[in-house]
Image (cartoon, rainbow, N blue to C red):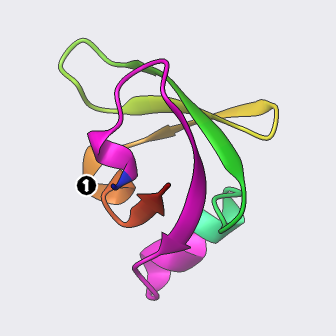
Amino acid sequence: MTLDQMKPGCEGRIKRLSVRDKLGQRLMDMGVYPGLTLKVVRNAPLEDPMEVELDGYFVSLRHEEARFVEVE
């Protein structure tokens, strides 16, 4: 399952990032890395972006970015 498929209230652990270019580096810089536990807090009214809680802080991601984050 990928992060963009998760609904608000769902929790999971990041399995891997399936992107290695600038976007992959940007996600890593924001603290999105394998092994981290996350929780989807909410989606914006039009579903984009989504707010995710990572290790005690909140990050907003677009669904097109979240589809590269594999979650278990």
Q: Is residue 15 left or right of residue 21?
A: right
Q: Which residue is mark 1?
A: 64
The image quadrant that residue 44 belongs to is: top left
Coordinates of residue 43 in the picture (x, y in percent): 35, 21
The image quadrant that residue 6 belongs to is: top left
Relative vertical location of residue 30 with respect to residue 49 in this rendering, above or below = below
- Pick the residue in front: 35 or 58: 35
Coordinates of residue 54 in the picture (x, y in percent): 70, 40
Mark 1, secondary structure of its residue: helix
Relative vertical location of residue 56 with respect to residue 1 in this rendering, above or below = above
- Tag 1: amino acid: Glu
Residue farthest bottom in this picture: 20
Relative vertical location of residue 5 with respect to residue 45 in this rendering, above or below = below
Q: Which residues are magenta?
A: 3-26
The image quadrant that residue 68 belongs to is: bottom left
Relative vertical location of residue 56 with respect to residue 4 in this rendering, above or below = above
* Quadrant of the drawing holding the N terminus: bottom left
Which residue is depicted at the point 35% across and 55% down?
2
- Verify whether residue 52 appears in magenta: no
Which residue is depicted at the point 25% across and 55% down?
64
Residue farthest front in this picture: 72
Count of numbered marks: 1
Q: Is residue 54 left or right of residue 21?
A: right
- Verify whether residue 14 appears in magenta: yes
Which residue is depicted at the point 39% across and 48% down?
3
Which residue is depicted at the point 17% across and 19% down?
46
Coordinates of residue 19 in the picture (x, y in percent): 40, 81
Residue farthest right in this picture: 56
Residue farthest top in this picture: 45
Q: Residues within 10 Å of mark 1 (few under 14, many from 20)?
A: few
Q: Is residue 66 left or right of residue 20?
A: left
